[in-house]
Amino acid sequence: MNVVAIACALAAAWTLSAGEEVAGSISRVELSGALTPRDTTEPSGQRAFNVLLVGYDSASNLDSDDPIQIGRQGEQAGDVIIIARIDERTETAQLLSIPRDLWVPIAGLDREAKINSAFAVGGARMLIETIEDYFDIPINNFVSVDLAGFEGLVSVVDHVDLFFEHPSRDFSVRPASGPPRSMTGFEVLEPGCQSLQPKMALALVRSRSFQIEVDGVWVDEGVDDLARIRRQQLFLEAFLGRAIDLGARNPFVLKDLVEEGSQYVTLDQNLTPQMLLDIGKTFDSFEPEQLQSYSVPTRYDFVGAASVLFDLEDETAPLVLLMQGVDETDPQTVGVSIRSTSSSLDGAGAVAQQMRIVGFEIDDPRLSEDAGEGVSLEFGPDGAQAADLVQQTLSDLGVQVSSLTEVAEIVGREVEITFGTESADQSGEGGTTPRQRLRRKLRRSHRC
């Protein structure tokens, strides 16, 4: 018994020592006064907080002969800006991506600029204050990673598997003479499941001129920041899936992953490896497809000669509420519009009034004579969960939805209801919900 007790004591001392060594090796940034304080009295498993995730385009830690170094002059702009809302009470996680070209007032400066410049000029502190001032979203913790760090994180899981429906590549630079040159080097010449090694994974998430080959012809598919955000979110989902495949649900494997991954990131002064472990343990049954990913709805415009993005305030408001902690089942987190044929206008108006009573903010139905039959719902790439909520509300009101359609042009958590001419009840694709069908689509298109 004494021998066992001594062995246990030595093991505990070694574990504590190893933990302190890991904690001491983590890169830290002091952000007191910038971060919104969290209630530290809340026990593990009962916390809800926002973490700002920043991927910045510094190549200083890459090898000097890495192709990414070509033409670079010490950039430090925030290439990827994501607010992660983590609620341990409901075991839900939501991501809100902020486009790097969003035009906003920069905190502490008497001017407006692209939001990524806040990080380049004033680091994490200025970016956090800019986000909190403009969106009124509290930021409780901070994590950042540079280009080399991203490659390191992927190396922790060895590779990430993604499915490509078509041969795909990145060609960002089209010189005046000669063939186009890929800015990132991303290239997948065979369709199907591909195992992306660290360098190719980085090339994918950085690609700003993504092309696919269709019938022997290379065509642009998503040549803007919003398309790149979509690819980044899908990669994050696949990364989580890979970590789970490696055994992240096992506390011992999770501990190894957190300890190895911590060396590649910079954390705020309060975010500890133990807290990351606690989150992982709380979310031990979480599936990657449950990750809800959104991006700030925007419109293109120009400020002088610069191409920029402005947020659409009405469409952004429901997403801000989510990041402020309003539950996703609250009608305020969904934007709803209704259109109707003249023959169904009275019924549509009555439904709109009933939906206002339960908390939805809806204008009077718009007249549309080109609507089809029955009642249809349309939602965007980010809006499947919102469409679920609207469909359930209509069902409670005795309205049967006959069709559900994802439309690329609809942004955020906006849902459009169309009351067409009278028709027989339809089940809406076998009764499956938008979220269920969207998950299947993502698995077919991106997950292996």
Image (spheres, rainbow, N blue to C red):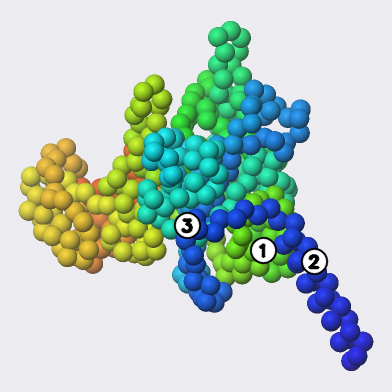
> Which of pointers 3 and 1 lies earlier in the amino acid sequence?
3
| Residue corresponding to mark 1 | 273
| Residue corresponding to mark 3 | 139
**Mark 2–mark 3 CB contact (< 8 Å):** no
Residue 195 lies, with reference to residue 429, above or below; the image says above
Residue 45 lies, with reference to residue 413, above or below; the image says below
| Residue corresponding to mark 2 | 18
Residue 164 locus on image (x, y percent): 57, 37
For label 3, the crowd category at 10 Å Cα-Cα, with few meaning under 14, some 14 to 19 and many 20 or more, is many
Give, as a three-letter code, the residue at label 1. Answer: Pro
Which image quarter holds the N terminus?
bottom right
Q: Is residue 258 left or right of residue 310?
A: right
Q: Is residue 329 visible?
A: yes
Give, as a three-letter code, the residue at label 2. Answer: Ala
Disc 2 and disc 1: Cα gap in Å? Answer: 12 Å
Query: What kind of element bears circle 1?
Result: helix
Disc 2 and disc 3: Cα gap in Å? Answer: 30 Å
Q: Nearer the viewer, residue 298 or 379?
A: 298
* Marker disc for residue 328: none
Residue at image position (49%, 46%) is 127
Q: Nearer the viewer, residue 138 or 10?
A: 138
> Which of pointers 2 and 1 lies earlier in the amino acid sequence?
2
For label 2, the crowd category at 10 Å Cα-Cα, with few meaning under 14, some 14 to 19 and many 20 or more, is few
